[in-house]
Each structure stands twice: as C-alpha cells, then as structure tokens.
Image (spheres, grey):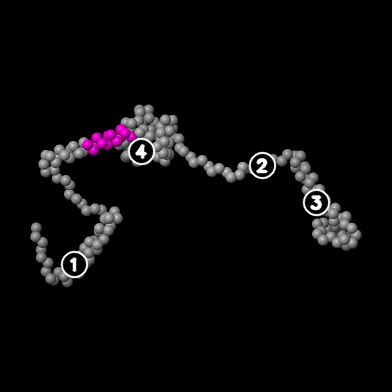
Amino acid sequence: MEKKARSSWSLLNPLEWIQAAFAFLAAVFAPILRWLGMLTPPSTEGFENLTKADVDDAASLAAEQEAAVDTLARARSPADVVRAYAKADAAGRATMDLRPLGLDQQDWLLRLSDEDLDKLSMLTTNGCERSLEARQVLPIYRKPPAEMEAPEVLTTPSAEDIEEMKREYVAERFRQIQRELWLAPGVPNLKPQHTPATLH
C-alpha cells in the first residue's frame, strides 16, 4: 500500500508539528524506558508453523520441557515441597504437585490454616523438615541476648529486720542530737542538726 505524498502546505499545520515532536520524544526515550523495564516491549507476531517438521519440532520441544519439569519435581525433597507450598498463593497451591509427600504428609499439609502456612513460609528448609516430621508447625524463635550481669534478687524483709532498721534510724538521729547537747561550754556549734525549742 503506497503512502500519500505530503504537500508543502501540511508543514503549516500545527498538528503536524505536535506529531513530529511526539515522534522525536518517543524515538529518544523509548529505548531508555524499555531498557529500564518501564515500557512494555513491542508486540511480536506469533510463530507460524508452515511445515509439518516445524510442528513436530515444537511438539518434541514441549515434551522435553514437560519431562524436565517432572524430573525437577521428583528431585525436590519433601521439605522443599512444603516450603514452596507455604510460600505460594492460593492459585499456586491448587496447581502444586505434592507427589513427593506421603499421603499422611499431604493430609497434614492441606489441613494447615493460613496462619500456620505463614509461619512455615518464614522457616528454612531444615525447619520445614522438622515440622513435617513432627506433623506440627515448629517455628524457630531467636534466643534472647544473654544478660551482662546477674539479676539482683529482691527479698522481702522480715519483721525483725524492719525493727532493726527502725532502731538504727532512731539511734542515728539521737546521736546527732546528743553530740549537739553535750558540747563544752563556750564551743560554738558549727553544723547544727537540732534546734532546741526556746521560750520567749
């Protein structure tokens, strides 16, 4: 299909100038945005099977890929399957292959609640293996840091200790008053702790 030749009068049209500006911006920024993954790649046409050999090659390639996926699924350990099942969403869990697990293990895994599956998804492969063997979710909690000093054990004082503390308190106050009362005549009291009451 032949394109129409543009006349020189089309250069005076402002829409042509706007279209040229957008085309220039797209030519400059499209490769950068595509490289950063912010722009969808250009659409490509599907593969056209023109000959029978092409169809046979595509079918054999699909069969090989499916066999490889089956081999990888069989090679996965039961703990890997449990961890992948816990990390998957609802749609992924519905299509997941649980053949590496035994029937009782599959029954235990399918009966878990969403909260237990969240706990399983946070575990390592060894943690999932321990949980699978025990048939219960065994989350691993980090040990609290060791305290630098031994905690002080507080004891409740007995009645005798309370009476002894009261006696010491009264004796100390009495000693202060006694020292002030028994000063020698004419010696000034530089640090008075007791002010005697005087009559005026």
Q: Position of residue 148 (x, y in %)?
A: 58, 45
Tell me which segment is drawn in magenta: 64-76
Task: Between label 3 and label 1, give the one nearer the viewer.
Answer: 3
Q: If you read the primary sequence from the N terminus, does the residue marked by circle 2 or circle 1 appear first?
A: 1
Q: Secondary structure at mark 3?
A: helix
In 3D space, how far apart are the residues under numbered discs 4 and 3 (Cα atoms)?
Answer: 76 Å
Residue 75 lies in magenta, yes or no?
Answer: yes
In 3D space, how far apart are the residues under numbered discs 4 and 1 (Cα atoms)?
Answer: 56 Å
State if disc 1 and disc 4 touch (CB < 8 Å): no
Q: Secondary structure at mark 2?
A: loop
Q: What is the crowding at mark 4: few (fewer than 14 residues within 10 Å), some, or many (at least 20)?
A: some
Q: Which mark is residue 16?
A: 1
Q: Position of residue 93 (x, y in %)?
A: 33, 37
Q: Which mark is residue 154?
A: 2
Q: Which mark is residue 173?
A: 3
Q: Is residue 134 left or right of residue 183?
A: left
Question: Callout 4, which amino acid?
Answer: Ala
